[in-house]
Image: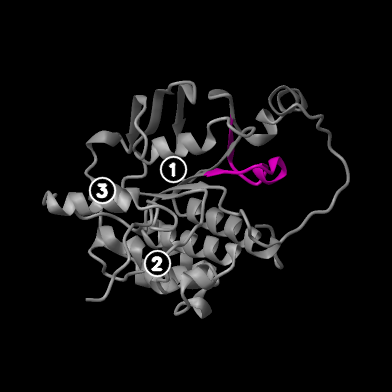
Amino acid sequence: MKARPLGAGSARSLGAGTALGLLLVLAVLASLALGDYNLGPLEVLRALGGRGDELARTVVWDLRLPRTLVGLSLGTRLQNLSFHLDSGLMVAVVGPNGAGKSTLLQVLAGLLTAEGQIHWDGRPLNRIPFLERGRTLAWLGQESHAEFAFPVREVVAQGRHAWGDDGHGVDAALDALDIRHLAQRPITQLSGGERRRVFLARALATGAPLQLWDEPAANLDVRHALEVLKLASGLAAAGSTLLVSLHDLRTAFRFHRVLVLDRGRLVGFGPPEEVLTPELIHEVFQVQAHRGPGLVLELPGGKA
């Protein structure tokens, strides 16, 4: 019997983790009812060189409903965080090492349990069935390890498990992350940056309008890092909400909002021009910040 890949676009694979993928299997065994949901945000791939039509589905996704988080606490790792997210936003999550960035994204994905309330589109996260979560949100972990030699295309197709392995959007995701030429290569034979793009493509293939990415540009060269930002911008323009952890504060100015964590506390949230002041940067990161001349990199034809 031929082995098949496990996991989902919003969970760790065997190399990058299988937490939510295993939950999806349990959900199938529990015979959870399947619903009809909207992949509308991924239509943006038309403008990014992918085949957006392949991703279109007829389903329900109300972008007007609230996405709120109230009083999230997890020991000393998160301390009474509360904020509201609108649709169509790119939110940079920044903070020193150990500030709680990865923990926050895992809590929002339902991979860690915390005190407090999380509502995605007006519904408590803990009441959204696992299969539906797999269609609603995608989590990209910080690590991109791969221990089994599945072909790249099969890894990206893991993102469609919550859709019954229908294969929709897989080719478009491969195109969007510039890995179509690697589709048949074993993922264990790729570089760190190439693996990173594979796992990003898997998250994209879910069609989930909530994308939680933990340092997505890690190990990427400058062009592909800028293309990831362009992809995120296109998804937000189509109505998706993205929370993206990163360390480069200069990159945070390309986002609509920045969320600043320090020792598990929320110390700033809003437009980066208003939040990332020299005073806050000094207090949180213990460095001096000032504006001056420097090298600005952009994709040909416009900003990312």
Amino acid type, callout 2:
Val
Q: Quadrant where the C terminus lies?
A: bottom right
Q: Secondary structure at mark 3?
A: helix
How far, Cα to Cα, is label 1 from label 3?
A: 27 Å
- The span shown in magenta is 244-260
At x 37%, y 35%, the residue is: 112
At x 44%, y 62%, the residue is: 147
Crowd band around label 2 with a 10 angstrom C-alpha radius: few (<14), some (14–19), many (20+): many
Amino acid type, callout 1:
Ser
Q: Secondary structure at mark 2?
A: helix
Amino acid type, callout 3:
Leu
Q: Residue 123 occupies which quadrant of the picture? A: top left
At x 58%, y 37%, the residue is: 257
Which residue is the site of mark 2? 155
* 282 relative to 35, above or below: above
Query: Which residue is more in the foreground, 278 or 263?
Result: 263
Sequence order check, earlier mark of 1 and 3 = 3
Sequence order check, earlier mark of 1 and 2 = 1
Residue 256 in picture, x, y percent from top left: 58, 41
The numbered mark at residue 87 is 1
Which residue is the site of mark 3? 23
